[in-house]
Amino acid sequence: MKGLVFRGDRKAEVRDFPEPEAGPGEVVVRMKASGLCGTDLHLYRQTAAERPDVDRIVGHEPSGIVESVGHGVSTVRVGERVSVYHYRGCGHCTQCLGGNIMWCPDRRGYGGPVDGSHADFILTDARNCLPLPDELSFADGAIMACGAGTVFSAMRKLQVSGEDTVVVFGQGPVGLCGLLIARAMGARVIAVEPVSERRALSRELGAEEAINPDEADVAAAVRDLTGGEGAPLAFETSGNPAARRGAAECLRLGGKAAFVGLGSVGRGQDSLQIPAGQLISRQLTLMGSFVMPIHIYRGLTDLISRRQVPLTKMITHRFPIEDAPEALELFDTGRTGKVIFEWQ
Ligand SMILES: [Zn+2]
Ligand SMILES: [Zn+2]
């Protein structure tokens, strides 16, 4: 089968690999769609010396059809349409049992310790195979596996409602998911994005305003759009230090902000600074959020199906896996919407 590896210094290579075989409790899924995520870009931009394993197949937004199941698998059927959960875990620890597989001490993320989804097939555990409702496409399934799942988890923590205005910082694939999901939950969305192509896409997908932070004072612009108060909620996806500060500064008294963007600078090692007096006197709630617990997947598919959330409208480019080097080069410009690999 074909699989994509990153050799360091922006070298993407499609290579031949043996097809995986399902062991006990495991499942092989034939890929139909696999999304490119910001984390892929981070790995793509690593130097050859930083790449821990240049032979590892990358990709962690898998969606496809169950090809084969291993011994003892009774909950997943061959031919079933699935989205595949982000991390493989031990299945027995407190975190796995609580649905937080991303916190399992034995977690294995696709493209890290185990092969990922930018390949014709992926090997996973039966418990990671999440049924994809008939009305949702494989591309929906891929986007829900990381981007939309991460967003949905954070939006639930923010308790977004129809009374809210949410300021979404960054309109890359995760920010665009933020826009669509906050709107589906009833909120009004103000987007913040420096790249003009992405601001245009954001307006097309329903942002009431798209502020260019290179030209405007974001906090002042948000106050203008909220009767002078500031926004009740902010959602930060870019990892840019100025955007992180902006997310705290644009809030009204008692506002809440969720941060999901690790960014390319420092990968979250840099600090988010806000005067403690402001945090206290303005009674702000600042929270981090990371991927999604597996048990909220059903709530996510219900929201996407019932509210007919047009997740796939943010896809600007679709490629076969053979053209992966071209896809990465394009996604690396930071000017696209969602980019996905698709299989016929
Ligand atoms: Zn991701
Ligand atoms: Zn575990």
Image (cartoon, rainbow, N blue to C red):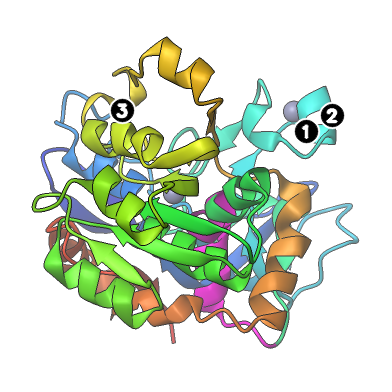
Residue segment shown in magenta = 135-150
Question: Of the numbered discs in the image, which one, if any, rests on residue 96?
Answer: 1
The residue most toward the top is: 276
The kind of secondary structure the magenta stretch mainly shows is helix
- Give the image quadrant in which the ligand numbered 2 is located: top right
Residue identified by numbered label 3: 267
Q: Residue at x 41, y 78 (%)?
A: 206
In what element is the residue under mark 1?
helix
Which of these two is toward me, 176 or 216?
216
Residue 134 vs residue 181: left or right?
right
Q: Where, quadrant-wise, is the C terminus in this rendering?
A: bottom left
Question: Of the numbered discs in the image, which one, if any, rests on residue 142?
Answer: none
Q: Mark 1 CB in 8 Å range of ligand 2?
A: yes
Label 2–label 1 contact, CB within 8 A:
yes
Quadrant in which residue 184 is drawn: bottom right
| Comparing labels 2 and 3, the label whose residue is closer to the camera | 3
| Kind of residue sitting beneath label 3 | Arg
Residue identified by numbered label 2: 92
| Comparing labels 3 and 1, the label whose residue is closer to the camera | 3
Q: Residues within 10 Å of mark 3 (few under 14, many from 20)?
A: few
Q: Residue at x 72, y 58 (%)?
A: 297
Whole-number angstrom distance, CA of label 2 to CA of label 3: 30 Å
Q: Position of residue 62 (x, y in %)?
A: 53, 62
Which of these two is toward me, 8 or 277?
277
Can residue 297 be seen here? Answer: yes
Q: Position of residue 323 (x, y in %)?
A: 21, 72
Q: Residue at x 26, y 40 (%)?
A: 42
